[in-house]
Image: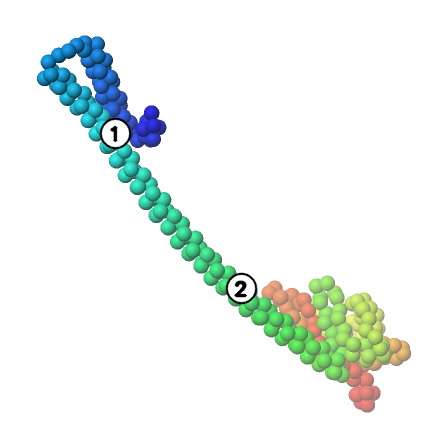
Amino acid sequence: ARLNELTTDNKSQQSRLDEVRNYFALFTNSLEERTGRFRPQPLPELVEGVNVLDDIRANISRINQAVLAEEHQLLQLRVRTLEREKSQYVNTLVAGIIIGTVLLLVFNAFLLSAQEGRTLAEASLKDSQERFALAVEGAQDGIFDWNMRDNTLYFSAQFFRILGYEKTRHYSLNDFIELLHPDDKDKSWATIAAGDRQCKPEYAQEFRLRHQSGRWIWIQARGKILFDDKLCPYRIVGAHTDISEVVQAN
């Protein structure tokens, strides 16, 4: 019964067990037959019956040893297979740890390099912005930036100082138009429209703006017109210079 339990997954072994069962049945039947007809017999016949039983027992023992030997070989094969799989698993695990560590180090190095590059870029941008801000504040001209797509305007602090204001304020396009001298409004728009039609990047004109005190000052505007891929203007950036003294001198 124990051998049958151990060899349920092996058809070859099951076949041998069937052979063992047959021998056991033959052995049992021979014993019963001998017991039923046992009577004192001459010694040669008794010895011959014993030899038959010994042969049956020897066959049973032979088959049993063969089953045990094969099971032992299968067990050793399974052990070797498990050892090999264990070794492969350990090797794979070690290789995975090494590769993961290398990738982690490379990724950290990449992040560190990217962070350093970003820090340098931010520092460079900050320096550029500071230089630009100092240049704008130190210049005698007022800087303007007109986004023609949404009609938003930016003016530097010097632009407002030219007009007599100490503090900057928000000026829309309509606010700027209100500052223009009535006689210069049409001319100013005509100059911009002409530049748009001819796709000229340079922008230059002279006009009058109302000072905080109510007087009119002459402004010389110079700038660049930016065009998109369809040659439509979308931005004008430039500077305003107070030329009132020059105009009055002439």
Between residue 188 and residue 21, name the one nearer to us.
21
Secondary structure category for the residue under label 1: helix
Kindly tell me whether residue 209 is visible in this rendering.
no
- The spot of residue 85 in percent (x, y) is 37, 47
Image position of 180 (left or right of 47): right
Measured from the top left, where is residue 67 in percent x and y? 26, 31
Residue at the spot x=40%, y=49% of the render? 89
Q: Which mark is residue 28?
A: none
Q: Which residue is mark 1?
A: 64
Residue 79 percent coordinates (x, y) = 34, 43
**Residue farthest bottom in this picture:** 249
**172 lies above or below 135:** above
Q: Foreground residue, 184 or 97? A: 97
The Cα–Cα distance between marks 2 and 1, rounded to whole angstroms, is: 65 Å
Image quarter for residue 15?
Answer: top left
* Residue 35 coordinates in the image, percent (x, y): 21, 12
Q: Residue type at mark 1: give it.
A: Asn
Nearer-N-terminus badge (2/1): 1
For the C terminus, the quadrant is bottom right
Q: Which residue is mark 2?
A: 108
Residue at image x 15%, y 21%?
Answer: 51
Residue, x 22% and y 21% (percent of image)? 23
At x 25%, y 27%, the residue is 16
The answer to which quarter of the image holds residue 183 is bottom right
Instruction: Decide if residue 53 is on the left or right side of residue 204.
Output: left
